[in-house]
Image (tube, rainbow, N blue to C red):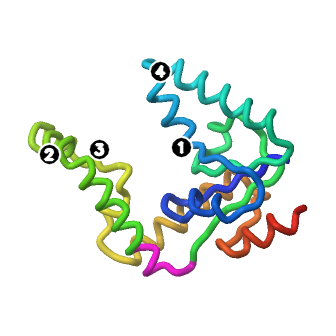
Amino acid sequence: MIIYITGAPGVGKTHILSNLSIKGYDLDIIFDNNCKKYSTYELVQEGYKKDIEEYIKSNNNIIFVGYQGKEQLFFTPDIVILLIRTDYEYYYRQKLLKDFKFLCVHHNEYENIIMRTEINELSNYFIYNEVVKMKTLSEFINWLKLVNQLVIDDFPNAKICTFSEVIDYINNLK
């Protein structure tokens, strides 16, 4: 059985893996590891697909987590779970902190981008830091609802669960 847990960035997909009894893998980590090994996008994609196939072959039951859409998956999940959070204010603060830390770690790169990039192009470099662009909690909640709806559009039969509900659901699958 292949279980795919998806959801908005920062919702806790990677963190949940350490709380589950079934072996699981983060699709972003698999992809990043292939980016370190290969120099072209085609080779990265081939390595990524091969790694996923190996993990599936090696495990009767497996969980993948990620924010990839249906068209970007190299497998067909038996169960799709949309991980959600309803503690919007705390989630918003955590997401801002995560984005802030990312920017700090890569500050030299961002300093160069900010100083050398065409002014109208600057926002393109902050695409992975969605929350930085949002001014209010309401904007964050609207963005989160949109992201969740995109997942539901891609996986209409997805089971919608909070963190603790996912753990209970998966532990009861055995």
Going by the numbered disc 1, the residue's amino acid type is: Asp
Which residue is tagged 2?
A: 111
Numbered mark located on residue 124 in the image = 3
Magenta extent: 86-92
Going by the numbered disc 4, the residue's amino acid type is: Tyr
Contact check, label 1 and label 2, Cβ < 8 Å:
no
Q: Residue at x 59, y 24 (%)?
A: 47
Which of the two discs, 2 and 4, sits closer to the camera?
Answer: 4
- Give the secondary structure at mark 3: helix
Q: Residue at x 81, y 41 (%)?
A: 59
Q: Residue at x 38, y 77 (%)?
A: 137
Numbered mark located on residue 38 in the image = 4
Image coordinates for residue 104, horizontal then vertical, percent: 24, 55
Q: CA distance from mark 4 to mark 3?
A: 25 Å
- Give the secondary structure at mark 1: helix
Relative height, residue 37 to residue 130 (above, below) = above
Q: Residues within 10 Å of mark 3 (few under 14, many from 20)?
A: few
Numbered mark located on residue 28 in the image = 1
Answer with mark 3 or mark 1, whichever residue precedes in sequence: 1
Q: Residue furthest left?
A: 115
In the figure, residue 68 lies in which quadrant? top right
Q: CA distance from mark 2 to mark 3?
A: 14 Å
